[in-house]
Amino acid sequence: MSMWRKKGHDGAAYKTAGELGHSQFGTPLDQILNTRVRPPIGKWLMVPANWGGYDKDAKQWSQTTAPLVWGMWIERNPGAVHPGREAVARTALELQTYAEKYGGFDPTQPVEIVTYLYVPDPNRHAFPLHLWVDDRPGLTVEQATTDAGAISTPVAEEFSTDMLGVGRKVTCHGTLDPQPGDLPGTRSMWVSVYYAFAIPGRQAVVTVRATDTDLGWMSAASDDLDEFVRSVRLEIIGGKPFTLGPTQS
């Protein structure tokens, strides 16, 4: 299993949960929950969690994926004109930037964080969404949706899905550190949307976070974010579906 990591006793190497028999936080191997998502085609891209094989590296994946993104967009928009090689190259560069930052395996993370990119229209910039299952003991959905960088009172609401049950959705805002070239006294804002679901009978909180600096773009994506979260499914080792209910072990 390549998802959950813990340092070996010598502090130098990282071992898998399969090698240890449990996660970093002590969750037994057969109790670890993984996520599976079936988002709508043409809106979301999953950044590969491992490089090698078909997805050789971030550059190769990005150069292969960018033409497909534009091709799907043209199919969904009859009459649209192909943007040309320069536009495809810009999209490839954007995808590569995200792939280098979030793709591949990171052994320092205690849990696997899977990143998806929201790209319903390649004429606009993509933004990332992160999905993970957090098994820290005692973690609550309130803690999982708290952002220390928020500058105003977050907007919280109940949110439920058939597969994850009743959870919490929180929208919060913050400011970025000044960047070179910014006008004196100005600071850019960001918006984050969190979703969290505590899984009954398990030491697990399914968490989703989407973040962008374009508040209008994030607002326009609200329905698609909800739809994405409703498509999240859970699995246990071996790919066996996990469903909520009193009979689920």
Image: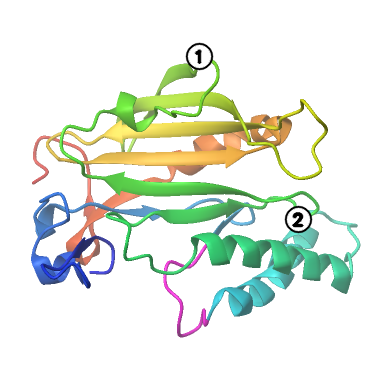
Residue 122: numbered disc: 2
Counting residues from the start of the chain, the first of labels 1 and 2 encountered is 2
Tell me the element at label 2.
loop
- On the picture, is 192 further left or further right than 122? left
Q: Is residue 24 above or below residue 227?
A: below
**Which residue is denoted by mark 1 in the rendering?**
153
50 falls in the magenta region: yes
Q: Specify few, some or many for label 2: CA neighbours under 10 Å numbering under 14, 14-19, or 20 or more.
A: some
10 Å crowding of disc 1: few (<14), some (14-19), many (20+): few
**Residue 187, image x, y percentages:** 71, 30
Disc 1 marks a residue whose amino acid type is Thr
Is residue 107 in the magenta section?
no
| Rendered image: mark on residue 248 | none
Q: Could you tell me which residue is drawn at 20 percent across and 66 percent down?
A: 238
Q: Position of residue 190 (x, y in %)?
A: 63, 33
* Kind of residue at badge 2: Pro
Tell me which segment is drawn in magenta. Answer: 47-56
Q: Are marks 1 and 2 in contact (CB under 8 Å)?
A: no
Q: Is residue 90 above or below residue 51?
A: above
